[in-house]
Image: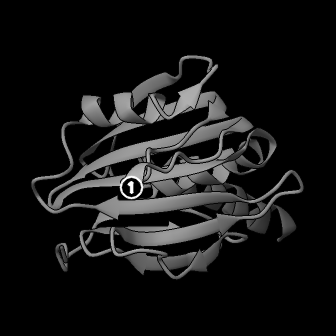
Amino acid sequence: MYKKWMLIFVLGLGFGCGSNSEDKGAAVSGGQGQDLGGVAVMVPDGWVTEPPSNQMRKAQYKLPGDAGDAELVVTYFGTGGAGGVDANIARWIGQFSESDGGKTSKQTVAEMPVTLLDIRGSFVGMQRPMGGASETKNGQRMLAAIVEAPAGAFYFKLVGPEATVTKWEQSFNQFVKAMKPSAGGAKA
């Protein structure tokens, strides 16, 4: 009887393995589902959902770390977007000085084109309206993704101390791979 149950167990494991998650979105262990109005995401355990600090942000998360917290910001500008993918990647690279130059890659998630950026260096940030420059922060890292959803492009930008971003790199990658277009469409 033991051998029979063991055989059933082993066969059951074999049939349950090997699912192809490409183009369908990968599962994120734990976490909380969130619809961003055009893209549905699974927020990993350990990320802290915060109220967006301004109207341009669809969502905002704090990713805690011993070296200091990192912040992931999600923006969406409607079907017209905020310039092309290459222009946004160039702008993000320009937010760093003394950088490693950045590395870009492309993938497809749930039939949505995704462009990724990984860059390290001194984060200068964006020029502020009214002329104020932001403070330069050394030893920073950015992981970013532009997801070309049916409702328009969504921009995901994770920035913080290199050690903190590295700590959360795997969950960021799972977060991106688990995205799916949402049925509700985007709310501009």
Q: Residue 107 appears at what percent x and percent y?
A: 36, 34
Q: Residue 170 appears at what percent x and percent y?
A: 66, 46
Query: Residue at point 49% right, 50% down?
Result: 132
Answer whether residue 22 is visible to the viewer in this image.
Answer: no
Q: Quadrant of residue 25?
A: bottom left
Q: Quadrant of residue 96?
A: top right
Q: Residue 113 appears at what percent x and percent y?
A: 26, 41
Dot 1 alpha-carbon crowd within 10 angstroms: few under 14, some 14 to 19, many 20 or more: few
Q: Mark 1 highlights which residue?
A: 130
Query: Residue at point 30% right, 52% down?
Result: 110
Query: Residue at point 62% right, 21% down?
Result: 99
Q: Quadrant of residue 115?
A: top left
Q: Nearer the viewer, residue 126 or 62?
A: 126
Quadrant of the image containing the N terminus: bottom right
In the displayed structure, 81 sits above or below 91; it is: below
Q: Is residue 85 left or right of residue 166?
A: left
In the displayed structure, 30 sits above or below 98; it is: below
